[in-house]
Image (spheres, rainbow, N blue to C red):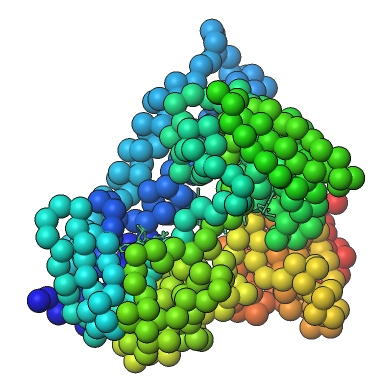
Amino acid sequence: MNSYDVAVIGSGPGGYVAAIRCAQLGMKTAIIEKYSTLGGTCLNVGCIPSKALLDSSHHYEDAVKHFEAHGIEIPGEIKVNLEKMIARKQSVVDQTTGGIDFLMKKNNIDVYQGLGSFKDATHINIAKDEGEAEVIEAKQTIIATGSKPSNLPFINIDKERVITSTEALKLKEIPKHLIVIGGGVIGLELGQVYKRLGADVTVVEYMDRIIPTMDAGLSKELTKVLKKQKFKLNTTHKVKSVERVGDEVIVKADNKKGEEVIIKGDYCLVSVGRRPYTDGLNAEAAGVKINERGQVEVNDHLQTSASNIYAIGDVIKGAMLAHKAEEEGVFVAETLAGQKPHIDYNLIPGVVYTWPEVAAVGKTEDQLKADGVAYKVGQFPMRALGRSRASMDLDGFVKILADKSTDEVLGVHMIGARCADLIAEAVTAMEFRASAEDISRMSHAHPTFAEAIKEAALAATEDRALHI
Ligand code: FAD
Ligand code: NAD
């Protein structure tokens, strides 16, 4: 029987990063993945393929709608070849997952393909797709089994017309009318892909606004922009049935007034969140407790109820984000090596990769109000930047929330071109506990979108933005 210092179950961004860090720290490491490719949800059916399709569809929309204004004329009709677009996406996925194979080899990590399930706290059975099951021994185990799409109890996801994000990443035709249940990250990102390719898109959201967990100002601005892009946004709608009749999908929901609304489309994307995944893990055999929300229960050291078993990523509490899972992977590896790592969960940024992009870190205005913190706001519109006018990306703003008495930056919320990348400046500033004045006194290259951060900081410090 092969024996390891550490076995990692699951090869998503949590698991594979944990394995690399364990190996770097000198531990003999194995990783177990039930699918034939490494990389988990993120690389196979999540972050990477969705961004590949967002990029392709963005190019198409630019060519159809925006090139002309730049003086670029394309004779003839511009067409989408969906099959080719999906194939390009898949080649991006294949290159990326192949990169993880390389990293495992480079770090001498043994890769086992198969479903890992605990026999006891130090032995894991690996049921392979091909060949006999194998048992390995591990002094310590890291559970990184991730998540799967959630559903509503009355919806039958047939994976053809009523679909999750996984099927939406490989459709064979562009929907005529895509109904999206859930106006969160997945619904809006994938909704925008198909909207750009020509579908009508209707979003049905239970809460009174889209992206309801983000700062209300961001929801409001994104709503405005998506409406300009002809999205239909039905907020405060409670879905009560989803029925497939032939190639049609009929969604019934109650609106704010309690009236029944019937929406008919040809595809329905169910994107109402994701659930932690522990099926087949046999956690009980190792003494690992699963809580009532289906999450592996962990303490502040990410240690489970079995002292030699840790858990990270989507399968535990907290934001379901790839970079959060990665931080936790490093955290556990370093803890196992006797180090004292730290994660500041308040500084894990959140991004929605629509266009304009939406990004945030730290506290929202609602959270500061609820916590009774006195704060000031500095906001600067993207349209006032020379860079925005040059590229015709005029929507959005940067908003900085700073402590009223100390000027420390408490939250940064932005929507606009390239905000997914711009948010890193805010994270860096907050990591070093910068004040709004600190940011306002840093030179920002001109002309860049990042100048909006400096201007918002000036507005927060002394209400003295320069360009508005
Ligand atoms: P996962 O990536 O889910 O990996 C878990 C792995 O464990 C899987 O490969 C699974 O097969 C394997 N596994 C499970 N049980 C077993 C077992 N018993 N034995 C062996 N293997 C097992 N996050 C971002 O930060 N940015 C984004 O842009 C982003 N976009 C997304 C887009 C979509 C469409 C989706 C669905 C998600 C997106 N996410 C994004 C979320 C991100 O994918 C997850 O937060 C991240 O993958 C979680 O990583 P993880 O390692 O915890 O789990
Ligand atoms: P989400 O939590 O972002 O959004 C789900 C939405 O569905 C919410 O707005 C919620 O109010 C709504 N909803 C819930 N029940 C409903 C109902 N009965 N009827 C109508 N609406 C309902 O979840 P998601 O978009 O499915 O994404 C799942 C996870 O994947 C998220 O946690 C997210 O962090 C992660 N993800 C991240 C990215 C990114 O970082 N860019 C992209 C995609 C997914």
- Choose between 452 and 226: the one closer to the eye: 226
Residue 230 location, x and y as percent? 74, 30
Is 28 displayed left or right of 404 in the figure? Answer: left
Q: Is residue 166 visible?
A: yes
| Residue at left offset 27%, top offset 62% | 115
| Residue at left offset 47%, top offset 38% | 159
| Residue at left offset 90%, top offset 45% | 257
Residue 61, quarter of the rendered image? top right
| Residue at left offset 75%, top offset 32% | 262
- Choose between 187 and 243: the one closer to the eye: 243
Residue 97 location, x and y as percent? 30, 51
Ligand 2 visible in quadrant = bottom right
Q: Is residue 231 visible?
A: no
The quarter in which the N terminus is drawn is: bottom left
Residue 379, quarter of the rendered image? bottom right
Image: 134 above or below 288: above
Image: 146 above or below 264: below
Q: Residue furthest top?
A: 76
- Choose between 369 and 412: the one closer to the eye: 369
Residue 2, quarter of the rendered image? bottom left
Is 212 displayed left or right of 317 in the figure? Answer: right
Residue 291 location, x and y as percent? 52, 76
Residue 458 location, x and y as percent? 79, 65
Image: 94 above or below 35: above
- Number of labels in the image equals 0
Image: 242 above or below 29: above
